[in-house]
Image: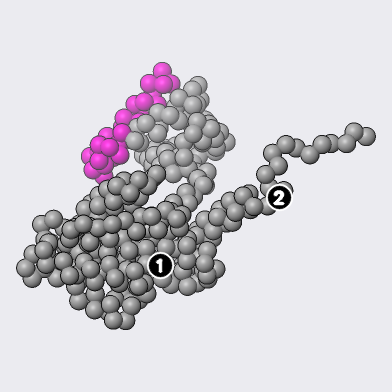
Amino acid sequence: MVHDSRLKLLEEFLDQLAHQRRLSPGTARNYRRAVEQLFALNDGVSLEQLEPQHMRRTVSQLHARGLSGRTIAYVLSGWRGFFNWLVKHRGFPHNPCVGLRAPKSPKALPKALSPDLMARLLEGSTSGPAQLRDKAMFELFYSSGLRLAELMSLDVADSEGMLRQAEVTVTGKGAKTRTVPVGSKARAAIAAWLADRAKLAALEETALFVGARGRRIGPSSVRYALAQWARRLGLPQHVHPHMLRHSFATHLLQSSGDLRAVQEMLGHSSISTTQVYTHLDFQHLAKAYDAAHPRAKRKTPLPVKKP
């Protein structure tokens, strides 16, 4: 009977969400699953008896099962909504989820190519206008740390500044503009592409980089071209455009140690966003230490002297 009453309340809650808030079917299914998990992990405990300690224990159980902090946060959202509804419409005394937070998930570090793999990627030979375009795009990604949207938005008119002043101005997130350097190899690749661009570009198309139909290239085309390029050169991992931006930032930080300069070139509004690359740099140093330090390779524990 207790179980039936709980399920009935859940159905009423979901029905109100569907009709009054027009919740999507997918979100409704996720909310149902979240609340049913709460029921299952607190079998024998009525809704009125659930206290914050019950909720904390349930969160710990979900975390122990391997659910990420982000997933648990979504589950908590379903619980809070259900209990808020119970307090407002069914006279429940309190919401036991108040103040409850999901465990933090470790932040995944961005993946970067090693300098050797980066050189291997960019030194690949070219044949025909499409490959000249691809090489120019990839060189520019790595040379200037551009985002995919920033590279796609470039026009032919922007190439003049790249070739003459060795710099390019782009508009990034938040409509913020920044000017970044363009290296010599990127400039040479862009010049080679411009010489053959007319073979692919439609008449009066202003975009610097165009796709197979002659119009401004799209994000999926850039991703596909880079993945195919890396596969052709035998790179041992999947390569995507943002990985070239990560590689630019990581290698620049390793060489210069200037976090503020890397922040400005990436266009990050906060230096805390850029600080993730200090972790990548430490990983590089740790590998060098393990490979070179005479004490680093010892795997057996030190002998313990008996008293």
**Which element is circle 2 on?**
loop
Three-letter amino acid code at the position of disc 1:
Leu
**Residue situated furthest top in the rendering:** 1
Mark 1–mark 2 distance (CA, rounded to whole Å): 37 Å
Relative to 65, residue 214 above or below: below
Which residue carries the number 1 mark?
266
Residue 205, image quadrant = bottom left
Relative to 169, residue 287 above or below: above
What segment is highlighted magenta in the picture?
1-29
Nearer to us in this view, 158 or 183: 183
Circle nearer the viewer, 1 or 2:
2
- Seen at 52% across and 67% down, the residue is 255
- Find out whether residue 27 is within the magenta segment: yes
Nearer to us in this view, 173 or 18: 173
Position in image of residue 189 (x %, y %):
28, 67
First in residue order: circle 1 vs circle 2: 1
Position in image of residue 78 (x %, y %):
39, 39
Callout 2: few (<14), some (14-19), or many (20+) C-alpha neighbours within 10 Å? few
- Seen at 22% across and 61% down, the residue is 133
Position in image of residue 86 (x %, y %):
40, 37
Which residue carries the number 2 mark?
294
Relative to 291, residue 87 above or below: above
Residue 28, image quadrant = top left
Relative to 47, residue 238 above or below: below
Mark yes or no: residue 258 visible.
yes
Mark yes or no: residue 100 visible.
no
Quadrant location, the C terminus: top right
